[in-house]
Image (cartoon, rainbow, N blue to C red):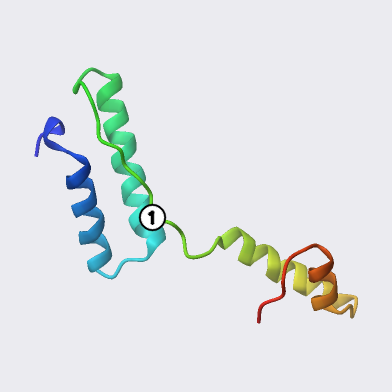
Amino acid sequence: MKLDEITSETVADFTAYRQAAGLQVSTVNSSLQVLRRTLLLALEWGATRSIPSVKMLPAKYSSILVFARRVFSAALGMFHLDQRTIWDAFGHPWKN
């Protein structure tokens, strides 16, 4: 497929194909980032006149926040503090 033949529909089909293969959202998004970068470089280098929008899939959760919560919980556990009370004090509802 030539660069000029890639459309938003083609990108959506590619995304659906990757998801149907059972890949995680983060893996599909990594593929989409490579595609987006490739298309942007092609545009910059004059290999194509326009490029389609490449939108990432929404993440189910932020891995950074999950990691931060684990570190936070471990640190509080060292001091024998009530994790739920501290977490709520920062405006984050506690979810088990």
Q: Viewer-proximal residue, 94 or 41? A: 94
What is the x, y in percent for residue 49?
A: 20, 21
Tell me: 26 left or right of 44. Answer: right
Residue under label 1: 57
**Residue that protrudes farthest toward the top in the picture:** 46
Q: Residues within 10 Å of mark 1 (few under 14, many from 20)?
A: few
Judge whether 17 appears above or below 34 on screen: below
Instruction: Look at 27% across and 64% down and name the residue there.
Output: 19
Judge whether 59 appears above or below 81 on screen: above
Instruction: Look at 89% across and 77% down and name the residue there.
Output: 81
Tell me: 88 left or right of 28. Answer: right
Q: Amino acid at mark 1?
A: Leu
Judge whether 18 appears above or below 84 on screen: above
Image quadrant in which you'd find residue 28: bottom left
Tell me: 5 left or right of 56. Answer: left
Judge whether 9 appears above or below 92 on screen: above
Q: Quadrant of the N terminus?
A: top left
Instruction: Look at 65% across and 82% down and name the residue there.
Output: 96
What is the x, y in percent for residue 18?
A: 25, 60
